[in-house]
Amino acid sequence: MKATEEITTQICDAIPELTPELLAAVLNAAGEDCQILFIQGEGQQVIKGKTHYPDYLQVEITDPREAMNLAQQLLNACSAAMDNGGVLRSPVTLSFAGQALLSE
C-alpha cells in the first residue's frame, strides 16, 4: 500500500515524529498479504443534509482484457438478477490484484 505525496505530507504534518520513510515502511508492512474489503454504500454519513461517503474507491485498469473480464462479471451478475426478478442471489464480488494507493 502506498500513499500519495499529499497524503504523506498531511499525515507527517499531523504527527511530527513521523517521517515519510517510516510511514512508507508502516504502509508496506500493513499491506503485506492483506485484502481491502470495500462494501458499496457502507460508511454513509449525512452532513448538513447531504450524503457523503468518506471511503471512495477508484480502480484503474490499464489492460483491456482485464477491463473486459470485469465488465463481463458485472453483466453476468446483472443478467442473473434480471432472470431472478431483479434481485441478486448474492452480492456481486469482484476481486482485484494490484496495489492500493492512498490519495485524496
Image: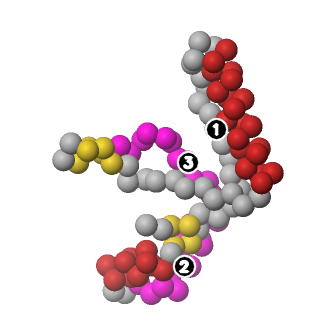
| Residue interval drawn in magenta | 18-44
Amino acid type indicated by mark 1: Thr
Q: Is residue 33 visible?
A: no
Q: Which quadrant of the structure image shows residue 93? A: top right
The residue wearing badge 3 is 37
Q: Nearer the viewer, mark 3 or mark 1?
A: 1
6 or 33: which is nearer to us? 6
71 or 12: which is nearer to us? 71
**Left or right: 49 with respect to 75?**
left
Q: Residues within 10 Å of mark 3 (few under 14, many from 20)?
A: few
Q: Which disc, if any, is residue 42? A: none
Q: Position of residue 68 (x, y in %)?
A: 76, 45
Point out the tag, 3 or 1, that comes first from the N-terminus: 3
Q: Nearer the viewer, mark 1 or mark 2?
A: 1
Q: Is residue 86 above or below residue 44?
A: above
Q: State which quarter of the image contains the C terminus.
A: bottom left
**Left or right: 84 with respect to 17?**
right
Amino acid type indicated by mark 3: Leu
Q: Position of residue 48 (x, y in %)?
A: 18, 47
Secondary structure of residue under mark 2: helix
Q: Which quadrant of the structure image shows residue 41? A: top left
Amino acid type indicated by mark 2: Ala
Point out the tag, 2 or 3, that comes first from the N-terminus: 2
Question: What residue lies at 59% left-to-right and 63% top-to-bottom?
Answer: 100
Residue furthest right in the image: 65
Q: Which disc, if any, is residue 24? A: 2
Q: Is residue 8 visible?
A: yes
Q: Is residue 76 above or below residue 86?
A: below
The residue wearing badge 1 is 93
